[in-house]
Image: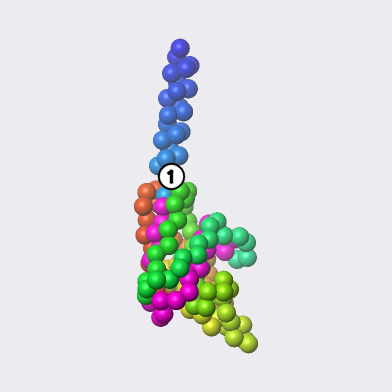
Amino acid sequence: MMTSMMTAALMTALLSLGADSDASLTVTVEGLQTPEGAVMMALYADEASWNGGDAVEGRRVVVQGLTATVEFASLPAGDYAIRMFHDVDGDGELDTNLMGIPSEPFAFSNNARGNFGPASWADAVFTVSPGGNAHALDLQ
């Protein structure tokens, strides 16, 4: 009987621990120059994936004004970074010029800037805590 009670208490504690670590993230993108196309956003959970691996989640949100909101639900609490671009022509790809420089607006979390490439993980990383979280990006 005591073992069953201890097992039940442990299971309850583990289940509540998992619920507390659930997080959501609302990202607001401001500074869109035109109410056309879509916002393409990728969320990364570690430096290795940021530097060439797969995103944890990706979103495509149709632009309907000069701001856009992107939602991520049921995330584990932890560190994340965002890469995004405004796909003005709606073709699903970041357009570049002949030199490979993006010709569509783009941004990174923390409004980080890169030097001749994407921003570094260290500059773009932010913490998502259990519960609701908000992050803002500004296309300049």
Image position, residue 90 (x, y; %)? 53, 74
Question: Image quadrant of residue 48?
Answer: bottom right
Circle 1: element type: loop
Is 95 a magenta residue? no
Query: Residue at image x 41%, y 56%?
Result: 25
Position of residue 113 measured from the top left corner of the image (x, y, whole percent): 48, 76
**Where is residue 75 drawn, in percent x and y?**
47, 50
Q: Is residue 106 above or below residue 15?
A: below
Give me the residue at 43% from left, 18% from top. 5
Q: Quadrant of residue 117?
A: bottom right
Amino acid tagged 1: Ser
Residue pointed to by mark 1: 21
Q: Position of residue 35 (x, y in %)?
A: 41, 76
User: Of residues 124 and 73, which is closer to you in this image?
Assistant: 73
In this rendering, is residue 54 above or below 35?
A: above
Q: Is residue 92 left or right of residue 78?
A: right
Quadrant in the picture for the N terminus: top left
- Dividing the picture into quadrants, the one containing residue 66 is bottom left
Q: Which residues are magenta?
A: 24-50
Residue at the image point whose x is 55% and y is 56% from the top? 56
Q: Please name whichever residue, 93 or 62, is drawn nearer the observer in this view of the structure.
A: 62
